């Protein structure tokens, strides 16, 4: 799951119009923003195994800190609390916390049974949608399309940047998704982790877009 998580970030703007798209992206992708650093530190592990699923060559060996349900609940509360301390926006805090949790729930749909419920737990969760490329494309593209539509519906451009920067972001996300699906596997885990760190640029792009768009006021 990649663009589906960004679709959640886009769509969450409808529930919390005051929250920047960058913050919504950060929340929806939070555990995947944390994961590359844990890979580089050797705390979590992944193997590159082409053919392990029809969609991704990644075999997630161990990622209890970033991707177990219990720790994701903790990250959700942490993100929500941090935003509340900074902004005193209860609604926005709740939406951001739910966005963090949504990542695990969407991953549970597509992953093989490799998501732990808690660190050290032996029971692993995953419905395995990644066994079908067609089904994965249908589900993920639908989540992304609905989320982007909600964002466009709830905001309008304040200037020309607010228009072309948004559409540039949408196209760029789709291009990255296509490259992830159809290009060669990463050469090694270190390269994978550094590419994963580049997702912070997408969060920054979200902040940039949102500074040039305004929520649509109800009539």
Image (tube, rainbow, N blue to C red):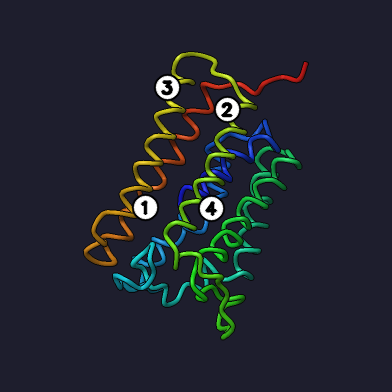
Labels 1 and 4: the sequence-earlier one? 4
Q: Which mark is residue 152?
A: 2
Q: Which mark is residue 139?
A: 4
Q: Position of residue 107 (x, y in %)?
A: 54, 62
Labels 3 and 1: the sequence-earlier one? 3
Labels 2 and 1: the sequence-earlier one? 2
The residue carrying pointer 2 sits among few (fewer than 14), some (14 to 19) or many (20 or more) residues within 10 Å by Cα, namely many
- Mark 2 or 1: the one toward you: 2
Looking at the picture, tell me which residue is in the foreground, 119 or 149. 149
Residue lying furthest bottom: 122
Q: Which residue is identified by label 3?
A: 164
The residue carrying pointer 4 sits among few (fewer than 14), some (14 to 19) or many (20 or more) residues within 10 Å by Cα, namely some
Residue lying furthest front: 134
Could you say whether the residue bearing mark 4 is in a helix, strand or loop?
helix
Labels 4 and 2: the sequence-earlier one? 4
- Mark 4 or 3: the one toward you: 4
Q: Where is residue 202 in the image (x, y as percent from the top left)?
A: 42, 41
Looking at the picture, does residue 14 appear above or below residue 53? above
Q: Where is residue 98 in the image (x, y as percent from the top left)?
A: 67, 52
Q: On the picture, is 59 further left or further right than 166?
A: left
Residue positioned 50% across, 51% down in the render: 138
């Amino acid at each position: 799951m990649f663009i589906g998580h960004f679709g959640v970030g886009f769509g969450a703007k409808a529930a919390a119009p005051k929250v920047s798209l960058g913050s919504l992206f950060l929340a929806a992708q939070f555990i995947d923003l944390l994961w590359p650093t844990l890979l580089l530190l050797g705390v979590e592990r992944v193997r590159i195994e082409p053919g392990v699923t029809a969609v991704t060559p990644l075999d997630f060996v161990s990622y209890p800190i970033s991707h177990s349900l219990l720790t994701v609940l903790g990250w959700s509360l942490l993100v929500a609390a941090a935003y509340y301390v900074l902004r005193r926006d209860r609604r926005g805090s709740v939406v951001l916390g739910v966005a963090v949790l949504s990542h695990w729930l969407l991953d549970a749909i597509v992953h093989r049974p490799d998501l732990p419920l808690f660190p050290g737990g032996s029971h692993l969760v995953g419905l395995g949608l990644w066994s079908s490329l067609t089904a994965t494309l249908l589900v993920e593209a639908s989540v992304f399309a609905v989320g982007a539509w909600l964002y466009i519906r709830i905001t309008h451009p304040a200037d020309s940047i607010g228009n072309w920067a948004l559409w540039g972001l949408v196209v760029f996300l789709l291009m990255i998704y296509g490259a992830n699906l159809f290009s060669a596997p990463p050469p090694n885990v270190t390269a994978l982790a550094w590419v994963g760190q580049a997702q912070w640029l997408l969060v920054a792009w979200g902040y940039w877009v949102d500074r040039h768009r305004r929520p649509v006021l109800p009539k």
